[in-house]
Amino acid sequence: MTALLCGACLAVLTCGMRILAEIQIVGVENVLWIADVAVGMAFFVIGFVACFAVTALLIRNAIKRRLALEAELQD
């Protein structure tokens, strides 16, 4: 869920900033909407994968630490 939220926020912010920049430079009638949405989707995928990987590593490390503590307490 965290990775999905992170990817979505990154996509919306990237797409929005590109659209605003293009409106300032070329005006509303010349904005490349499809290209901006495509870039936003690419950043969504990048953000989702990165956050998913970090979350998975954090969970993996937490499980390892818990197993180590349980083994230490049993000794």
Image (tube, grey):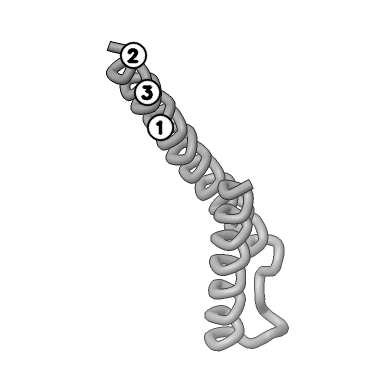
Instruction: Work out whether residue 60 or residue 33 is closer to the camera in this orientation and state it.
Output: 60
Near mark 3 (Cα within 10 A), the count class, few <14, some 14-19 or many ≥20, is few
- Please name which of the two marks, 2 or 1, marks the residue nearer to the observer: 2
Q: In this view, does 47 lie to the left or right of 72?
A: right
- Please name which of the two marks, 3 or 2, marks the residue nearer to the observer: 2
Which percent across, then down, holds residue 74?
33, 13
Near mark 1 (Cα within 10 A), the count class, few <14, some 14-19 or many ≥20, is few
Which percent across, then down, holds residue 59?
46, 33
- Please give the label number shown on residue 74: 2
Which percent across, then down, holds residue 67?
38, 20
Q: In this view, does 55 lie above or below 35?
A: above
| Residue lying at 58% horizontally and 49% vertically, measured from the top left | 2
Q: Label 2 amino acid?
A: Gln
- Where residue 64 sits, quadrant-wise, is top left
| Residue lying at 37% horizontally and 20% vertically, measured from the top left | 70
Q: Is residue 61 above or below residue 15?
A: above
Q: In this view, does 61 lie to the left or right of 9?
A: left
* Label 3 sits on residue: 64
Q: Label 1 amino acid?
A: Ala
Mark 1 → mark 3, Cα distance in angstroms: 5 Å
The local secondary structure at tag 1 comes to helix
Query: Are dots 2 and 1 in contact, CB under 8 Å?
Result: no
* Label 1 sits on residue: 62
Q: Label 3 amino acid?
A: Lys
- Where residue 10 sits, quadrant-wise, is bottom right
Task: Tell which circle, 2 or 1, labels the residue nearer the N-terminal end.
Answer: 1
Task: Tell which circle, 3 or 2, labels the residue nearer the N-terminal end.
Answer: 3
The local secondary structure at tag 2 comes to helix
Instruction: Work out whether residue 70 or residue 57 is closer to the camera in this orientation and state it.
Output: 70
